[in-house]
Amino acid sequence: MPSSRKFFHARHPSHIITRKSLAFVLCLLIGFAGLLLFSIVVFRQDITTGVYDKPLSVSVVWDQSGGGGAQKRHKVMGFVGIQTGFASVGRRRALRKTWFPSDHQRLQRLEESTGLAFRFVIGKTHDRSKMAALKKEVEEYDDFVLLDIDEAYSKLPYKTLAFFKAAYALFDSDFYVKADDDIYLRPDRLSLLLAKERRHTQTYIRCMKKGPVFTDPKLKWHEPLGYMLGKEYFLHAYGPIYALSADVVASLVALRNNSFRMFSNEDVTIGAWMLAMNVTHENNRQLCQPECTATSIAVWDIPKCSGLCNPEKKMLELHQTKICANSPISVSNE
């Protein structure tokens, strides 16, 4: 106790206290000035260069971390994930020569003019050579969202759920759009569609079709859904492109990965989930047009192919036509 009292009541010469006080104040002023300068630099950097100072491509471990952790979400009106695979290098090359900007500056201008952000979405493979090639492409173009899920046709429903979870974690968006890499998309028209006022917050925008009926006489239900409405299957979206509102995607994110049944077809899977969630279905035939028109949003060879039949060639041909390439919002890759 005595030593304790001496410690608390120890007296120091006044000149030492004065010097220490001055030194403390001086350090405080220097620190405050440094903080102010740093804030000004960061503020100016955000205004002058936007969101493209940092790499655009990102790897997301969605099933462990729920979609990418606590990083800041980028605000856009719509996020468009172009679903692609390891065999689609030629398709991505064709896209980057047409409507999909091939560098950061053009990608930024497209986002600023439409309110839409675009990224290629791909999973992973155990093939080291393919992963090495993907790494080089990411380094060159930096326009990917990389999912920690095996890239396989048989796992498309799982990839789709992974995409929506990752997209929700990365982007604060009004709509999340799933699109395939073999359609010709018109971003200006898609922007107008998503910008419309809607009374319902849970919306599923798509081009509608009837699901096929495969009857197994040994079973009392039918693939792909397991039940029928009257004598027909429910109506759901064609797979190449559809959009889900933020509230719908938030509900998907909250689901456990095994909450809903996965069907063999991704479009049927999403359609079944939308029925179960009782969302508002909005049918738009401009999302499935066989040719460019004044109002078409997505162009592909319906019903011959689920996409363009020869996408690498057809994509370039469509882009050479005036009505496809020339729009109020146009970003040239020349």
Image (spheres, grey):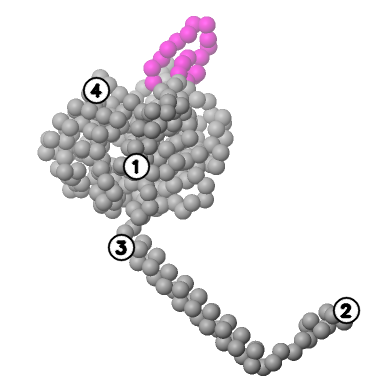
**Which element carries disc 1, helix, strand or loop?**
helix
The residue depicted at 23 percent of the width and 40 percent of the height is 99
**Is 213 a magenta residue?**
yes
Q: Are marks 2 and 4 in contact (CB under 8 Å)?
A: no
The residue depicted at 64 percent of the width and 93 percent of the height is 15
Q: Which residues are magenta?
A: 211-230
Give the image location of residue 127, x and y in percent: 42, 26
Q: Which mark is residue 1?
A: 2
Viewer-closest of 38 and 270: 38
* Residue for badge 3: 48
Upstream in sequence: badge 3 or badge 2? 2
* Residue for badge 4: 309
Tell me the distance, in whole angstroms, between the alpha carbons under discs 1 and 3. Answer: 24 Å
Tell me the distance, in whole angstroms, between the alpha carbons under discs 3 and 2. Answer: 62 Å
Tell me the distance, in whole angstroms, between the alpha carbons under discs 2 and 4. Answer: 89 Å
Comparing marks 3 and 2, which lies closer to the viewer? 2
Upstream in sequence: badge 2 or badge 4? 2
